Image: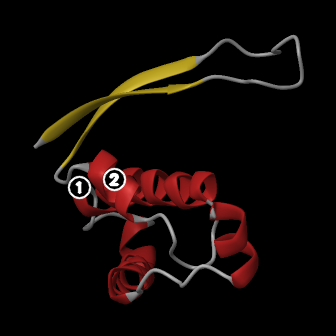
Amino acid sequence: MYRYRITVEMLSPEPATSAPLKFETENHDDIIAIANRMNGRFDLDEESAKSMAIGMKLFSEIILKNRTREPFITIRPAIADFIKAVKAARPTEPSEAEESSIQ
């Protein structure tokens, strides 16, 4: 089991209207490694891919821990199908525009 400290800090608008939110949580996976592997999937930019990975892993761990309770029973099959699709997806090839900007 992996343990994480999560911090969400408002960057805009300035000045921030909320204090940073901090909490600790556990996950059965190395969610940092998973987030790093998401880059290039689903035509998402790097920040969106990492946000999706972290959000899904945090959410799916709560679903897993509460799998026999409502409302988690209801969403579990859909989340399981979504996670299978994510795992099966291959990174997309960079477009010609992206390749020329790299060179």
**Image point (32%, 46%), residue name:** 32
Which element is circle 2 on?
helix
Rendering coords of residue 60 (x, y %): 36, 61
Disc sitting over residue 65 in the figure: 1
Image quadrant containing the C terminus: bottom right
**Image point (72%, 64%), residue name:** 101
Q: Amino acid at mark 2?
A: Ile
Rendering coords of residue 91 (x, y %): 45, 80
Circle 2 residue = 62
User: To which quarter of the image does residue 87 belong?
Assistant: bottom left
In the picture as drawn, the residue positioned furthest to the left comes out as 1
Which element is circle 1 on?
helix
Q: Is residue 73 left or right of residue 42?
A: left
Q: Are marks 2 and 1 in contact (CB under 8 Å)?
A: yes
Q: Amino acid at mark 1?
A: Lys
User: To which quarter of the image does residue 74 belong?
Assistant: bottom left
Q: Nearer the viewer, residue 43 or 15?
A: 43
Q: Is residue 84 left or right of residue 43?
A: left
**Image point (58%, 57%), residue name:** 46
User: To which quarter of the image does residue 68 belong?
Assistant: bottom left
